Image: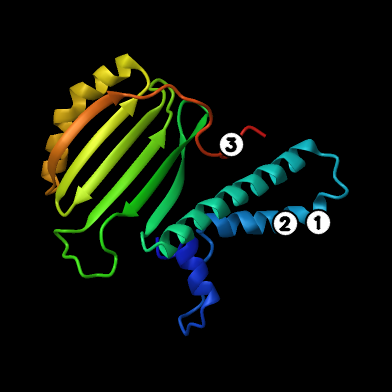
Amino acid sequence: MLNSGLFLEARLAGKSNEPALDLSRDFKAALLRLRAELAPQLPATQDTRLTDVATQVERTLARLDLSQLATVAADREHRPAWALEIPLRTQGDEVDVARLTIQRDDDADGSDTAAQRTYSAVLKLEPAGLGRVTAHITVVGEHVAVGFEVADPSVQARFEKRLEALRTSLGERGLTATRLATARAAPATGEDGYPAFTDTRV
């Protein structure tokens, strides 16, 4: 993470004596390079595939900028937060997006101990076969509480059956599950977030 996103951009902007940073694996850097390569070709092209790719690149860069701005805004309120979007390839050529937000909820001045630090995370995704799923996670030291909101009653039953396996898995990693639960999600009122991440079928 230190070599990506806002962390990487801060290091690029700062006056540092460290060796040149490797940008070859950074997602945003790769998109910026692709945009620069496409730009000279766009004015004269009649290839709709090329213009579609350029549009997808611009949309994705805009989404990344919005995500980074949200992180900066949270940091200015002294509530450090990180917003990530993780593309997931599901069935066939379909691409789903997992939206993950992680936030530090307690005092961020360093006065709290490791056992007192509280983090919360929200993971949203909608994989084929499961429908809309939201996981609310709270971590206090080595104690974890997880609540799943699912839209489909049959999927909720499947999650219920796996809660004890999740408790065991957490225990094997030195974590104590203080609460594991499922609930029916409220009906969707529309897109909660941004348009589709990218369309790989261009």
Residue 197 point in image, percent of width and height: 56, 39
CA distance separating discs 1 and 3:
27 Å
Residue 185 in the figure: left or right of residue 164: right
Any mark on residue 40, and which?
A: 1
**Residue under the point 61% across and 54% down:** 31
Colour scheme of the rendered structure: rainbow
Question: What is the crowding at mark 2: few (fewer than 14 residues within 10 Å), some, or many (at least 20)?
Answer: few
Residue 52 point in image, percent of width and height: 72, 39
Disc 2 element? helix
- The front one of 60 and 121 is 121
- Quarter of the N terminus within the rendering: bottom left
Q: Amino acid at mark 3?
A: Pro
What residue is pinned by disc 3? 195
What residue is pinned by disc 2? 37
- Quarter of the C terminus within the rendering: top right
Lower sequence index among marks 3 and 2: 2
Any mark on residue 111, and which?
A: none
The reply to whether callout 2 and callout 1 are in contact (CB within 8 Å) is yes
**Residue under the point 67% across and 48% down:** 58
Q: Is residue 21 visible?
A: no
Question: What is the crowding at mark 1: few (fewer than 14 residues within 10 Å), some, or many (at least 20)?
Answer: few
Nearest to the eye among marks 1 and 3: give it.
Answer: 3
